[in-house]
Image (tube, rainbow, N blue to C red):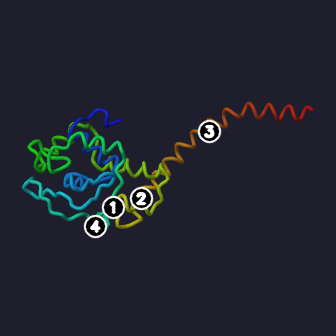
Amino acid sequence: MLLTHLIGRALTFCALGIYAGLRRKEILGLQWGDLSGEKLTVNCAISFPGNHQADPDQSLKSKASHRTIPVPPQLAEIAAAVRSSLYVVPAADGGMIVKRLWQQATRLVSGAHPHMLRRSYATSLYRAGVDLKTAQYLLGHSDIRMTAEIYTHIAQQNVAKSADKITAYFSSQKSKSSQKVVKAENE
């Protein structure tokens, strides 16, 4: 698992994506005041205008992006271990992270992209049996069709995987069932 290979800020960043489904800008804008016990409230985002400096522009992607998310114990434990600044995922000096540092950090995990972490959270919601409307809220989607598209994609993957299992099952049963039919005809 990705998290076992990370420490510090990188671990916290990835854990917020995997266990809370936050967008990159939401993670970078997250402050400790937004984490309260077993809840995490998404209030603001960080943008990177042309000068590569982070700008806490306070604007989220949509009204639906303002949400309160349950914090699983795994995330609470990871986050508590790094509390040292106003921001949950700060720059080394404790301030807001700058785009250049963010880009350097993403190179450490080859092939990984922040949105993959968010998709992982959506997959976890699906596999946990979370209904579509609740998943829409937790993911901060303004349009339920976006959530449904993710859930449908996951369901299609599950069908493809189950085809192999079904084939293997029937293959293993083939010899057993043909023997039963032969015995029944001979009696």
Amino acid tagged 1: Gly
Q: Mark 3 points at which residue?
A: 167
- Label 1 vs label 3, nearer the camera: 1
Q: Do the residues labelled 1 and 2 touch (CB within 8 Å)?
A: no
Identify which amino acid the numbered label 2 is placed on.
Answer: Ala
Question: Image point 45% across, 55% down: which residue?
Answer: 151
Which numbered disc, 4 or 3, marks the residue that appears first in the sequence? 4
Image spot of residue 137 (x, y percent): 38, 62
Q: What residue did someone put label 1 on?
A: 140
Answer few, some or many: residues within 10 Å of disc 4's Cα (few below 14, many 20 plus, some between 14 and 19): few
Between marks 3 and 2, how big is the CA–CA gap?
Answer: 32 Å
Task: Report the Cα–Cα distance between label 4 and label 2.
Answer: 16 Å
Residue corresponding to mark 4: 62
Mark 4 vs mark 3: give the one in front.
4
Tell me the CA gap for discs 4 and 3: 45 Å
Q: Hey, what amino acid is under mark 4?
A: Ser
- Closer to the chain start, of discs 1 and 2, is 2
Camera-side residue of 140 and 182:
140
Q: In this view, does 42 lie above or below 100?
A: below
For image coordinates 26% across by 35% down, the residue present is 6
Q: Looking at the image, do the residues carrying marks 1 and 4 touch, with CB atoms under 8 Å apart?
A: yes
Residue ID for mark 2:
135
Element assignment for label 4: loop
